[in-house]
């Protein structure tokens, strides 16, 4: 037997601990590879435009396609992993992700890059739910909390590193083809994750029965997203939307709602559970997450485009501008649980207000600040935004999920992630189009005007999140900070933030 702190582990416990550590290592590598790819290509967009002659709409689809594929696949893949086992889905998903990275990096057409990014989103959306599911399966109690915390730390680190890594690759390689190396930078991580998954993830027998997969619901949700995205891309890209887009959207949404109700009545687990949408606190918390997530990703894209295309900064320096804010955000997220435990929902509302103020300030700086001070001002504004955003995401998710109907927490968490990804799709596509479509290369004044408008839109989105948070009358919830201090209220149990879909 092996000593472990003040306790002694039996041989079977030691073996289980070793297996858990290996599973967690695989999960962290998969999480890093797939999450860093969300934004790593953003700093290389000018190189993509120059190399492939990509149009504004093609650039919009390049930045949005990954989140679109991720959103559509997330919940069905989680359900399939629940029923059929996670090992093959994780290994297959991350291996496909790596292969598609190579195809995208060698593409000779912007349309091929768009398709690859969409398929990469499908692959990442297949692998990621298995990460959370494996953590749920192999860890319990405080060990599960610690594992989820490690995953959240890796996710934060991926967000910080992505623009710096992409900018460094562009700076080192140079030229219009530098983006190809950025697109392929995740290949070693993906291959490592696939190999480690084969070697270290335990084989688990298939669970009896069939998975309750809501395939029609997933297809209809994807169609509804496209029905919104296609006219939005056309309008923001300087074109015009077809008259039939609104009727199509109405038909698809109506069909989706009718199908989900029928599927639930037949005993299935729908992607959009009707009972969740009628829960006021869950609906408002989902709106908070949706508006805030899309605004923050959209802000990063707008600032990178403005700094490179408008001010002429290199990709590396553009990535550096947001780094202090990302680091502060990572630090404030470590305090988020304690702040929310003391103040509940009002703490989230106040933090969102701080983010909104920083975005209004960023828009003003971009519009009117002298060129020699605008970068320093944006660094300060991003630090303020990071301090606020770090106090928003995890507490809001927990407050949103803790009141859902019994037995639906996992599905609710999955739907919350889907809503965030759909918000990311629309924000990245539309805001990128606002900046790129209305400005000629080298027109600094035009870039200032367009970027300021886009940042004002992100401020309005966060303002909507503030309104939704204020409307939530959820009481000041007590969040469990350690296994020694459980919540004494049996009616309110708190699911982990990353509960599997």
Image (tube, grey):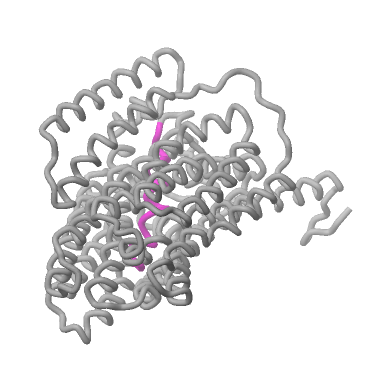
Frontmost residue, 85 versus 10: 85
Q: Position of residue 180 (x, y in %)?
A: 45, 62
Compared with residue 34, is residue 327 higher up or lower down, i.e. above or below? below
Compared with residue 359, is residue 30 higher up or lower down, i.e. above or below? above
Frontmost residue, 176 versus 369: 176
**Could you tell whether 348 is left or right of 447 in the image?**
right
**Could you tell whether 178 is left or right of 447 in the image?**
right
Determine the residue positioned at 45% across, 69% down: 331
Q: Position of residue 152 (x, y in %)?
A: 51, 56
Q: Position of residue 320 (x, y in %)?
A: 39, 76
Q: Could you tell me if residue 424 is visible in this image?
A: no
For this orientation, the residue located farthest to the front is: 108
Q: Position of residue 394 (x, y in %)?
A: 42, 53
Magenta stretch, main secondary structure, is helix
- Magenta span has 370? no
| Magenta segment | 386-404
- Magenta span has 389? yes
Frontmost residue, 229 versus 2: 229
Quarter-of-image position of residue 444: bottom left
Determine the residue positioned at 51% across, 59% down: 184
For this orientation, the residue located farthest to the top is: 266
């Amino acid at each position: 037997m092996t000593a472990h702190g003040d306790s002694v582990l039996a041989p079977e416990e030691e073996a289980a601990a070793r297996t858990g550590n290996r599973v967690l290592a695989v999960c962290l590598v998969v999480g890093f590879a797939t999450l860093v790819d969300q934004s790593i290509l953003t700093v290389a967009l000018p190189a993509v435009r120059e190399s492939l002659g990509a149009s504004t709409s093609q650039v919009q689809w390049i930045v949005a396609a990954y989140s679109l594929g991720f959103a559509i696949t997330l919940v069905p893949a989680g359900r399939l992993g629940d029923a059929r086992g996670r090992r093959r889905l994780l290994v297959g998903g991350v291996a496909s992700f790596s292969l598609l990275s190579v195809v995208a990096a060698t593409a000779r057409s912007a349309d091929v890059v768009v398709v690859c990014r969409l398929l990469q989103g499908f692959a990442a959306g297949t692998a990621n739910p298995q990460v959370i599911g494996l953590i749920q399966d192999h860890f319990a109690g405080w060990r599960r909390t610690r594992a989820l915390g490690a995953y959240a730390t890796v996710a934060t680190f991926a967000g910080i590193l992505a623009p710096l890594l992409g900018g460094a690759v562009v700076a080192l390689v140079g030229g219009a083809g530098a983006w190809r190396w950025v697109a392929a930078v995740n290949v070693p991580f993906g291959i490592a994750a696939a190999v480690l998954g084969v070697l270290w993830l335990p084989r688990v027998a298939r669970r009896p029965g069939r998975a309750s997969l809501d395939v029609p619901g997933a297809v209809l949700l994807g169609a509804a997203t496209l029905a919104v995205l296609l006219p939005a891309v056309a309008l923001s890209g300087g074109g015009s939307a077809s008259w039939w887009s609104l009727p199509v959207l109405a038909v698809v949404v109506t069909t989706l709602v009718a199908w989900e109700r029928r599927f639930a009545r037949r005993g299935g687990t729908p992607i959009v559970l009707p009972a969740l949408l009628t829960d006021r606190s869950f609906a408002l918390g989902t709106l908070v997450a949706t508006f805030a997530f899309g605004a923050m990703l959209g802000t990063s894209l707008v600032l990178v485009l403005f700094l490179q295309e408008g001010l002429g900064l290199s990709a590396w320096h553009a990535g550096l501008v947001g780094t202090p804010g990302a680091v502060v955000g990572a630090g404030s997220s470590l305090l988020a649980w304690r702040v929310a435990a003391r103040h509940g929902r009002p703490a989230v509302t106040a933090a969102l207000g701080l983010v909104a103020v920083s975005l209004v300030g960023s828009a003003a700086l971009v519009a009117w600040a002298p060129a020699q001070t605008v970068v320093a001002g944006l660094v300060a504004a991003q630090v303020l935004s990071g301090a606020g955003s770090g106090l928003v995401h995890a507490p809001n998710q927990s407050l949103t999920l803790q009141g859902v109907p019994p037995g639906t927490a996992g599905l609710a968490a999955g739907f919350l992630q889907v809503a965030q990804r759909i918000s990311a799709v629309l924000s990245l596509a539309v805001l990128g189009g606002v900046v790129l479509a209305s400005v000629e290369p080298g027109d600094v004044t035009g870039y200032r005007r367009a970027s300021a408008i886009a940042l004002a839109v992100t401020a309005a989105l966060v303002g909507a999140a503030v309104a939704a948070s204020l409307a939530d009358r959820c009481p000041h919830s007590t969040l469990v900070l350690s296994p020694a201090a459980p919540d004494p209220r049996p009616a309110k149990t708190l699911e982990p933030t990353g509960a599997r879909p």
